[in-house]
């Protein structure tokens, strides 16, 4: 029975290596425990029960912690970077008709819910296609 558990552990480890997310690592560990137990007892029910229950317990207890520790921070792209930045209206924006703003040295087609005059400071709220949605900068 030890060879079967060894095979299961190897297969699960290969699956874990081929995937990006943590998927089978807990069952690799519980498979190793079941492998060790199989040396001392021939009870398949005990081995399988231990394998299953220990795998689920390890997953429940450690997945949130490991996911938090291994989470890769997202890097903002050039487009995302301007969200929240200040800009200057270079062409008057009419309600729901495009105007133009200059943000970070670049000119963008801009839309807003209200009229915004040329020279007004605005905040970039979001990007929709090739247009930015802006609002008047308070303060």
Image (cartoon, rainbow, N blue to C red):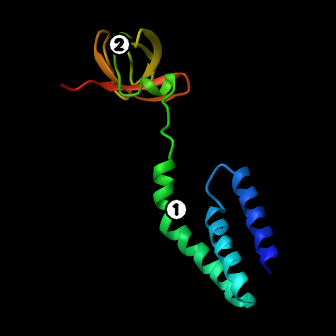
Residue 42 in the image: state x and y as whole percent.
75, 89
Question: Which residue is outermost to the front?
Answer: 40
Q: Nearer the viewer, residue 132 or 7?
A: 7
Which image quarter: residue 38? bottom right
What is the crowding at mark 1: few (fewer than 14 residues within 10 Å), some, or many (at least 20)?
Answer: some
Q: Which residue is mark 2?
A: 89
Regarding mark 2 in the picture, which secondary structure is present there? strand
Question: Which residue is outermost to the left?
Answer: 139
Residue 101 in the image: state x and y as whole percent.
40, 14
Which image quarter: residue 34? bottom right
65 in relation to 105, above or below: below
Left/right of residue 120 with respect to residue 112 in the rendered view: left
Q: Which residue is mark 1?
A: 63
Regarding mark 1 in the picture, which secondary structure is present there? helix
What is the crowding at mark 2: few (fewer than 14 residues within 10 Å), some, or many (at least 20)?
Answer: many
Q: Earlier in the sequence, mark 1 or mark 2?
A: 1
The answer to whether mark 1 and mark 2 are in CB contact below 8 A is no
> What distance separates the C-alpha of mark 1 from that of mark 2?
48 Å
9 in relation to 104, above or below: below
Which image quarter: residue 122? top left
49 in relation to 94, above or below: below
Going 18% across and 25% down the picture, which residue do you hit? Answer: 139
Going 48% across and 60% down the picture, which residue do you hit? Answer: 64
Q: Nearer the viewer, residue 18 or 119?
A: 18
In the picture, the quarter occupied by the N terminus is bottom right
Q: Nearer the viewer, residue 39 or 10?
A: 39
Residue depth check, mark 1 versus mark 2: number of the one nearer the observer: 1
């Amino acid at each position: 029975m030890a060879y079967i558990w060894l095979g299961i552990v190897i297969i699960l480890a290969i699956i874990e290596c081929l995937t990006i997310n943590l998927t089978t690592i807990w069952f690799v560990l519980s498979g190793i425990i079941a492998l060790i137990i199989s040396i001392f007892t021939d009870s398949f029910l005990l081995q399988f029960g231990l394998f299953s229950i220990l795998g689920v317990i390890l997953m429940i207890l450690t997945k949130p912690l490991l996911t938090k520790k291994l989470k890769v921070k997202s890097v903002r792209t050039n487009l995302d970077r301007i969200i929240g930045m200040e800009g200057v209206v270079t062409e008057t924006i009419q309600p729901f008709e495009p105007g133009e703003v200059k943000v970070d040295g670049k000119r963008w087609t801009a839309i807003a819910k209200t009229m915004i005059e040329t020279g007004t400071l605005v905040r970039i709220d979001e990007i929709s296609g090739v247009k930015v949605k802006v609002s008047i900068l308070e303060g």
